[in-house]
Image (tube, helix red, strand yellow):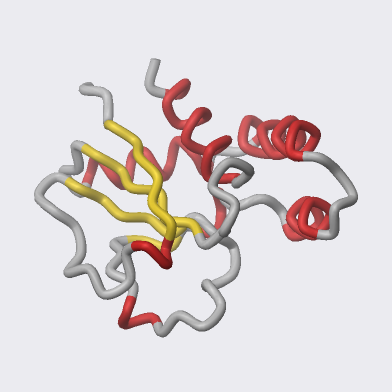
């Protein structure tokens, strides 16, 4: 089984794009639909809420109850405890993808759950 390339894109940077290129599988990985974005403006193949942080963890991070390091540790624990990450990889492979694009809405691209998810997905492929 070949390894999929996994990249990140901010939702607001790809609005009104015409969608996936050949071999590309675009997945929204936020639990909530991005505020102010009409569904028809975001070309995506899948919306996978199961790989997003739990509501309690997301709230605690966004309310500044924890730093990104602590959030990452707890989110990674959630990912490792479930089968959602491997299911996402499997769906992308079944769709014939060579590349997964993880779509997220956070403004802060250095402190987003999508980075943690990307790392977890890459490790699952090794």
| x then y, percent, for residue 34 | 52, 72
Residue drawn at 54 percent across, 47 percent down = 109
Q: To which quarter of the image does residue 74 belong?
A: top right
Residue drawn at 62 percent across, 37 percent down = 79
Of residue 124 and residue 102, the one placed in the foreground of this image is 102
- The residue lying furthest to the right in this view is 65
Residue drawn at 37 percent across, 62 percent down = 13
Total marks shown come to 0
Q: To which quarter of the image does residue 10 belong?
A: bottom left
| x then y, percent, for residue 26 | 31, 55
Of residue 82 and residue 65, the one placed in the foreground of this image is 65
- The residue lying furthest to the top in this view is 126
On the picture, is 71 further left or further right than 37? right
On the picture, is 48 further left or further right than 35? left
| x then y, percent, for residue 124 | 45, 24
34 w.r.t. 69: above or below = below
44 w.r.t. 72: above or below = below
99 w.r.t. 73: above or below = below
Q: To which quarter of the image does residue 7 belong?
A: top left
38 w.r.t. 81: above or below = below
Quadrant of the image containing the C terminus:
top left
Residue drawn at 32 percent across, 79 percent down = 41
| x then y, percent, for residue 1 | 22, 22
């Amino acid at each position: 089984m070949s390894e999929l390339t996994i990249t990140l894109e901010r939702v607001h940077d790809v609005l009104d794009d015409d969608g996936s290129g050949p071999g590309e599988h675009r997945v929204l990985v936020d639990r909530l639909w991005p505020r102010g974005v009409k569904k028809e403006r975001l070309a995506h193949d899948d919306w996978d809420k199961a790989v997003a942080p739990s509501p309690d963890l997301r709230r605690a991070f966004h309310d500044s109850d924890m730093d990104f390091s602590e959030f990452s540790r707890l989110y990674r624990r959630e990912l490792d405890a479930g089968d959602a990450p491997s299911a996402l990889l499997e769906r992308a492979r079944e769709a014939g993808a060579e590349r997964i694009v993880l779509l997220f809405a956070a403004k802060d691209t250095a402190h987003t759950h999508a980075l943690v998810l990307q790392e977890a997905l890459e490790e699952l492929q090794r």
